[in-house]
Image (cartoon, coloured by chain):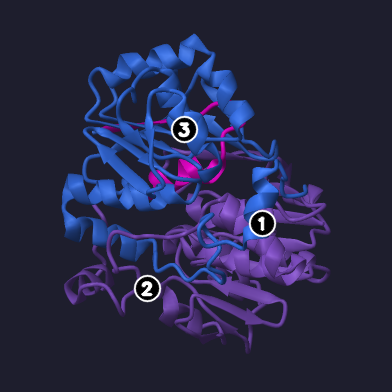
Chain colours: A purple, B blue
Amino acid sequence: MQIAVLLYDGFTALDAIGPYQTLSPLPDTEVVFVAEQAGPVQDDNRTLSLVAAKSLAEVSGPDIVVVPGGPPENVQVQMDNEAVTGWLRAVDATTTWTTSVCTGSLLLAAAGLLAGRRATTHWLSREDIGKHGVEPTGDRVVFDGKYVTAAGVSSGIDMGLTLAGKIAGDQYAQGIQLMIEYDPQPPYDAGSPEKAPAELVEFFRAGGAAQK
Amino acid sequence: MQIAVLLYDGFTALDAIGPYQTLSPLPDTEVVFVAEQAGPVQDDNRTLSLVAAKSLAEVSGPDIVVVPGGPPENVQVQMDNEAVTGWLRAVDATTTWTTSVCTGSLLLAAAGLLAGRRATTHWLSREDIGKHGVEPTGDRVVFDGKYVTAAGVSSGIDMGLTLAGKIAGDQYAQGIQLMIEYDPQPPYDAGSPEKAPAELVEFFRAGGAAQK
């Protein structure tokens, strides 16, 4: 089984690494990081590069594709990039699972792959994805046929484990969970707009950004 | 504030990316990925490289150092590598926080930085770290003075958020949690040896590995 993780300029690192770390231990699995051109690809902080081992042209038949998100302005560039959306359409024709994390679902939507489907995305982008003929949900992991979308950034870990269970069985996926010691104990309960302090939700809705 | 994330041949990707994604949004923060030599560094799956922007020699005074773990045999190579342990001792002299994820604590211990301290590590390495004069605990995130250690792989996210709160306050850290939508909903409750099915724990204790 080949899993292709798409990289592009300004993606969010954990969006890609969450599914990678949970899906790569599956049996007989090869993971390939892929980008328009092979080579280093910068993340949204511009301080980290992951290396794409292959170009899009070199990866034509993955069984699973994983599309990470990034800040909306970075994702928009790829939504307008036919090299990327065309590749997504082409490989989707033969994938077993087509997946995304965070605003990566906007990229799947722009490629026309989510029309009429239920999907999730980063909580700040729920309205945006609705504009693409997609039925947005606030769920953390959404399966609709072979399309699997996850909410913001860290949700890719839950998606990866859930998908691992569907592919290799519950016990195998539990083994993956145990080996990455995924027994979350966040120090706060502020991980969704429904749970976080209202003033924080408003701050980010108004366009506030974490200082850099 | 400069945060140095150490990379070395065969590290585990999520160990590095969990703290990175939760600490990099701190105010006035620069993150630098560092390795013995600058350039691409392969992870434990040999399918992904992260780029070290700087060599150890180029990073002499980070405020925070983050040491990811990896499979014990890969960590052992670095425990025996004076270039790495010597650098850890040198930068630790002036860090505000010295941190590790998973078996990264073995590397801190080999550098002599955890003697007499409480620390955690991947659940399979608790006995090993006890051999280095460290008091092992099964806790997920352990603070002992300025030394912060996290349990296996995914626990670096909890460590990063906890440390972010100590540095920038609870509300700031909650903002980071909200923006990475860290509202974990694992499909199973098998993320620790106390919770996972006993036969899985035994399988891995006996040296079993997830198939590749």
Give the answer, above or below, for where A6 lies relative to B123: below
Instruction: Name the element at disc 3.
Output: helix
Instruction: Name the element at disc 2.
Output: helix
Estimate the spatial distance between the alpha carbons at disc 1 and disc 3, rounded to whole Å: 24 Å
Residues marked 3 and 2 touching at CB (< 8 Å): no
Number of other residues with Cα within 10 Å of mark 3, as a class: few under 14, some 14 to 19, many 20 or more:
many
Q: Nearer the viewer, mark 3 or mark 2?
A: 3
Instruction: Name the element at disc 1.
Output: helix
Q: Quadrant of the N terminus of chain B?
A: top left
Q: Nearer the viewer, residue B192 or A35?
A: B192
Magenta-span inclusion, residue B4: yes
Q: Position of residue B90 (x, y in %)?
A: 32, 13
Q: Which residue was labeled with disc 1?
A: B200
Are marks 2 and 1 in one subunit?
Answer: no
Residues marked 1 and 3 touching at CB (< 8 Å): no
Residues marked 2 and 1 touching at CB (< 8 Å): no
Left or right side of A30 for A33 = left
What residue is rendered at 57% in x and 35% in y? Answer: B70
Magenta-span inclusion, residue A94: no
Task: Identify residue type, mark 2.
Answer: Leu
The residues colored magenta run: B2-22
Q: Which residue was labeled with disc 2?
A: A124
Task: Identify residue type, mark 1.
Answer: Leu
